[in-house]
Structures are given as structure tokens and as C-alpha cells.
Image (cartoon, coloured by chain):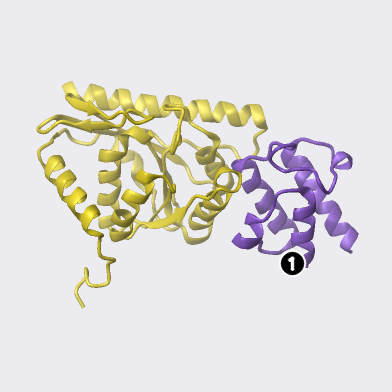
Amino acid sequence: MAQDREQIVLDVIARVSGVHAASLERDTELVGELGIDSPKALHMLIQLEDRLGVEIGDDETARLRTVGDVLDALARLA
Amino acid sequence: MSRGADRPRLPPKTLLAYGLVRALVATYRRRPVTGEQHLAGLMTRERPAILAFWHNRLLLCGDYVLGLARRGVRLAALVSRSRDGEATAPLARRFGVTLVRGSSFTGGTLGLRRLYREIAGHGRTAVTTPDGSRGPVYRARPGTVVLAQLTGAPIVPLAYAADRAWRLRSWDRFLVPKPFARVALAIGPPMAVPRQLDDAELAGQCEELGRRLDAALEAAEAALTA
């Protein structure tokens, strides 16, 4: 189940950034490497919340810097 | 309790600035608003809209928007942490406009998401400046278009023109009509943004928004001499 959630997170990040999911690493930077600017980040957050049925709080959001940060945040909300 | 008793008090500097601006605005000779019919049926809880204008047109477009708030339209605006954002925030709050703050995270993700929630969750009409808060001037960045894309709310362009005005030395050459200037405000037709957009299409929608804001500006300029 945790693997399913992780795959969903990677799929969403991949779709928003236009990068293949298999090439994403935990330390891949959302802004610097994937070019996820504010509008793309909004897409990402809404898709993650819709698909995983969670609400990502502002404090949690403000800490997101890398793919690993997103995975960890969603794992905490599971 | 009186209606004003539960309103937040304005800081003295804001109150003074607001008084000066109101005194200046009161001298303007206003032409009838062009295109106001485009707002019909919009800005309700069920059909919120996104009101958009170039940042340097904030003075009278903002004045018009505050007038909508006084008439009961439920509004939300994204306010930057810049000096002009801090200056206008108490005033907007005073008139019942819900304010959401920008953030340093990826240039405002939190602020954009809060605005999304105000539109999608609370049915508030949003107020945005597509080239704000830092420009480049007259270039619509994606935030407004993405909000429209995700919420389904149409973007309604606003602009105003004046026959005599000062230009401030800010990044956007902020427009301040001179005392007793003739001014005209124009509202353009609503712009619907498709739900599915790739990057190229999003860029195209931003350009289209820019064209519509420019068209509203031209309509305002035409109304000055009509």
C-alpha cells in the first residue's frame, strides 16, 4: 500500500514536471532541477490531495524542497 | 452594534494616505463604466470570477473593486509582502476583502493555493494583477490563468485610462491621474480557460490574457473621448 502511495506521488511529480518518474531521485530538487514553479506546484498539491485523499497543510508545504520531502510529507499524512 | 464597529481600525499612516487618495479620487471626472454588463451573473458564491488588471492600474481598478466589496461581493486578493502590498492590505481588509499572503516558497505557492481555496472552497471572487507584484510590466504570468484553469472561474479583465496622469518611478510606472483628470474604466468580456493545458497552451493563454487586458485598456482610452 505504501508503495502504491509512493508511486502515485512520483507519477504526479513526473506529470507536473514533464520528467519520467523513473528518473526521479529522493534528492531531486523540485524548483532547481524539475522547474516546478508556483503554478506547477499548485497543480502538484491539488493532484496529490485529490488522489490520496489528504490535506497538505501550509507548514508541511513550506518545507517541500525535494522529491524526498514530498514522499516523507505524504507518508506522515497516511 | 454599528456596521463599522467590528471593522479593523486603520493604522494612522494608512488612514492619512487613504484620506489623501480619496480626496484626489473625488476630483476625477468619471466616464460611465464600459462593459459592466460582463459582470452580470458572475461574482456569486456559485459563479465566482477572477478580476484581473495590470498592476499599474491598481489605483482606480482597486477603487472599483472596493466598491464591489461595499455592495456585498465576496472578494479575496493575494497580497505580496512588498511595501505596496503591506500598505494596501489594511485598507482592503477594512472593506471586507479576504487577504491571502504570498510566500517565499517557490515564489508564492502557498498564496496561490490559499487563493485557489477561497475560489473553489468558499466561492469568493478573486482579485489579481497578472504582472504583479514584480513584473515585467504588462506581461501576464501564469498564476491567474492557472487559477482559472483549476477552478473553472472566468477571468474578467479590468482597466482604466486618464487624460492627465503622473507616472511613478516604480517598476510598473504606476499611474496616478492628476486632480480633476477625466477617467474611464472598462471591463472586458470574461475569458474561460480550458481545464487541460500543456505548457505551450498555458503560455498561449497567458498571452491571450495579456491581449484582453490591453483590449480593456484600449476600450477605456476610447471611452475617454466618447
Residue A34 position within the rendered picture, expressed as x and y whole percent measured from the top left: 74, 37
- Disc 1 on helix, strand or loop? helix
Q: Height in image: B3 above or below B33? A: below
Q: Is residue B62 left or right of residue B26?
A: right
Chain A colour is: purple
Q: The C terminus of chain B appears in which quarter of the rendering? A: top left
What is the x, y in percent for residue A20? Answer: 84, 37
Residue at the image point whose x is 27% and y is 39% from the top: B59
- Quarter of the view holding residue B167: top left
Q: Residue at x 44, y 51 (%)?
A: B48
Residue hosting label 1: A77
Residue B123 is at least partly visible in this image: yes
Compared to B192, does A52 lie above or below?
A: below
Residue B215 in which image quadrant: top left
Task: Determine which quarter of the picture holds residue B71.
Answer: bottom left
Chain the render paints yellow:
B
Q: Which residue corresponds to the image point at 29% horizontal and 66% vertical from the top-left?
A: B8
What amino acid is labelled 1 in the image? Leu
Q: Nearer the viewer, residue B219 or A55?
A: A55
